[in-house]
Image: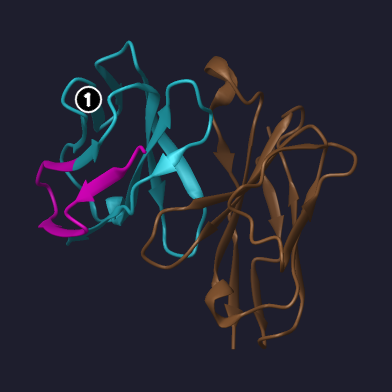
Amino acid sequence: KQEVTQIPAALSVPEGENLVLNCSFTDSAIYNLQWFRQDPGKGLTSLLLIQSSQREQTSGRLNASLDKSSGRSTLYIAASQPGDSATYLCAVRPGGDDKIIFGKGTRLHILP
Amino acid sequence: EAGVAQSPRYKIIEKRQSVAFWCNPISGHATLYWYQQILGQGPKLLIQFQNNGVVDDSQLPKDRFSAERLKGVDSTLKIQPAKLEDSAVYLCASSLLSTGIHNEQFFGPGTRLTVL
């Protein structure tokens, strides 16, 4: 059974720092992996989607990497800003199955 | 392009009452999903529709939860009777298709339910 783990559960860093959020999954047979952002009381906004054949995706200050063999993905945020404060969720779509399996998220707080 | 619409945004009810949520997916999206997200957890899939048919409802508590998508467009999720543990955010998502590269899901703003 596929399980997705995100560590740490919460993170506070000063504005301007570069940071890395981690996601691990137990079964390397995945179709794709997606990173979402969720603001308090709001829905999910897709940030980056990495297909199983890809190693990374970039969008602005965000870079997500995927290492299927080790069951890991990282979301790198460069030059963090207070507006980046939110919960970041990692989700995996297992190969051959179209249900998304979510991690519990990392609550990020950027200190002004 | 309009996103996924949900209403109401917030709902407060007492236990044993009933409640209904509405979702209108992105135009042309055949697949619709309802998720339950309890505070501090990731979303959990409750039910998935392909057009007006149910694809997966294995995690839907069918003794109290029901959902329909009669015309294959908008959908309603109902809870009757509600329990305290149903307090959560209910998220609706849609995708163009359920498989392949068109599987990417787009989420609505959610409905926050509080059961007292």
Residue A82 lies in quadrant: bottom left
Q: Which residue is mark 1?
A: A65
Secondary element under disc 1, as helix, strand or loop, is: strand
Q: Residue at x 30, y 43 (%)?
A: A4
**B13 inside magenta stretch:** no
Which residue is located at x 33 percent, y 21 percent?
A29
Instruction: Tell me, by letter, which chain the rendering colours cyan.
Output: A
Residue located 36% across and 65% down the image: B40
Tell me which segment is drawn in magenta.
A1-21
Q: Nearer the viewer, residue B116 or A98?
A: A98
Q: Colour of chain B?
A: brown
Residue B46 position within the rendered picture, expressed as x and y whole percent measured from the top left: 60, 52
Q: Position of residue B70 (x, y in %)?
A: 89, 44
Q: Amino acid at mark 1?
A: Ser
Q: Chain of mark 1?
A: A
Q: Is residue A87 above or below residue A67?
A: below
Instruction: Answer above or below: position of A69 versus A9.
Output: above
The quadrant of the image that shows the N terminus of chain A is top left
Compare residues A73 and A27 and report the one nearer the observer.
A27
Instruction: Using the rendered view, name the quadrant where residue B49 is placed.
Output: top right
Residue A109 drawn above or below residue B64: above
